Amino acid sequence: MELMPIRLLMPYQPGSKLEIRVCRMWVTKSIGENPQPTSLDCVIVDKQGDAIHVTTNARDIQYFLNHLRVGDAYEINKYRVVHNRASNKVIPHAAIIELNQKTTIVPVLKTTEEIPMQWFNLIELEQLHERIDRDVELTDIFGCLTAVQPIEELTIQRTRITKKRNLNLENIRGETVRVTLWGETATNFEDSGYQSLPPPIFIALTSLKVKKYLGYTSTCFI
C-alpha cells in the first residue's frame, strides 16, 4: 500500500497508511481543583517534514501509552481524520488525526528515508506582538535560557491554588521575553535536566499563548 503524505490528509476523507515519527506526546487534563486526564495527544511528522496533531479519547490513554513512544517511527492505519480545532491549534493543519483501538500501529525499525526527530513551528521573538491575544494557533519559540525563577503559588478565582514559574529567553540580537509555566509544567521543569547542562542553554518551548502583562509581552504555557 502506498504511503499517505501528511500534507494531503483532509477532514473526513479516507486516509491511507502513514509512516511517521512521534515527536512529542502529552496527556491533556481538565482544568479545576481535581484535574482529570481527557486525552493523549501527540505531534507526528513524516519524511516530507510535515506534521499533524494526533489525539485519543480518555479511555484509550493507557492503551496508546503502551504502544507509542516518543522518538520511535511507526506505520499507522485505520485512523479517523477530522477538522482541526478553531482555536489553540497545536499544528497549523486543516485536520487532526483521531486514533482508537482499531487503529493499526506497526513499529518501523528502519525507514526508507530519514524522518525528522523533531518538528516545531518556530517564530522570531520580534513577531510575538502579532500573536498577542490571538489564539488561533499556539506559538513555538526558541532561545537562550538566561534566567529561571523559583516556583510561586497563586490562588485562582479565590478557590484553586496553582503554581507558576517564570523563565527568561534571549535571542541572538539580545531581545528577551518572559515565559510563564503553569501547574505541572512549572514543577516538571526541575526534572528536565537543565541544571546539569553547561551554559549557554538553548531551549524550544511549544504550545504557548502570548499575552500582555504590565505593558510587556509575555508568553504563557498552557
Image: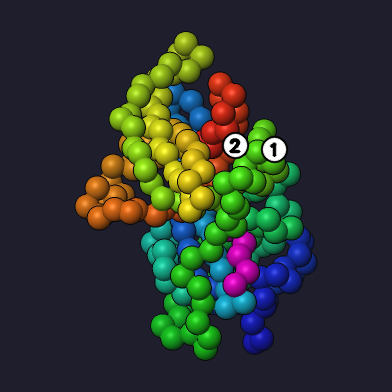
- Above or below, 139 against 17 in this view is above
- Above or below — where is 194 with respect to 161? below
Q: Residue 220, which numbered label? A: none
Name above or below for residue 198 compared with residue 30: below
Which residue is the site of mark 2?
Answer: 210
Query: Is residue 58 something one can see in this rendering?
Result: no
Alpha-carbon neighbours of circle 1 within 10 Å: few (<14), some, or many (≥20)?
Answer: some
Q: Secondary structure at mark 1?
A: loop
Residue occupied by mark 1: 134
- Residue located 50% across and 73% down the image: 116
Residue depicted at x 66% and y 35%:
132
Q: Quadrant of the N terminus?
A: bottom right
Query: Magenta span has 80?
Result: no
Q: Main secondary structure of the magenta part?
A: strand
x and y percent of residue 97 in the render? 63, 60
Q: Residue furthest front?
A: 173
Looking at the rendering, which quadrant does residue 138 occupy? top right
Identify the colour scheme used: rainbow
Q: Element type at marker 2? A: strand
Q: Which residues are magenta?
A: 49-56
Q: Residue 159, image x and y in percent?
A: 45, 13
Is any part of residue 20 visible from this angle?
A: yes
Q: Amino acid at mark 1?
A: Arg
Q: Nearer the viewer, residue 122 or 154?
A: 122
Q: Is residue 120 left or right of residue 133?
A: left
Q: Quadrant of residue 187?
A: top left
Seen from the viewer's position, the closer of residues 67 and 41 is: 41
Contact? badges 2 and 1 (CB < 8 Å): yes
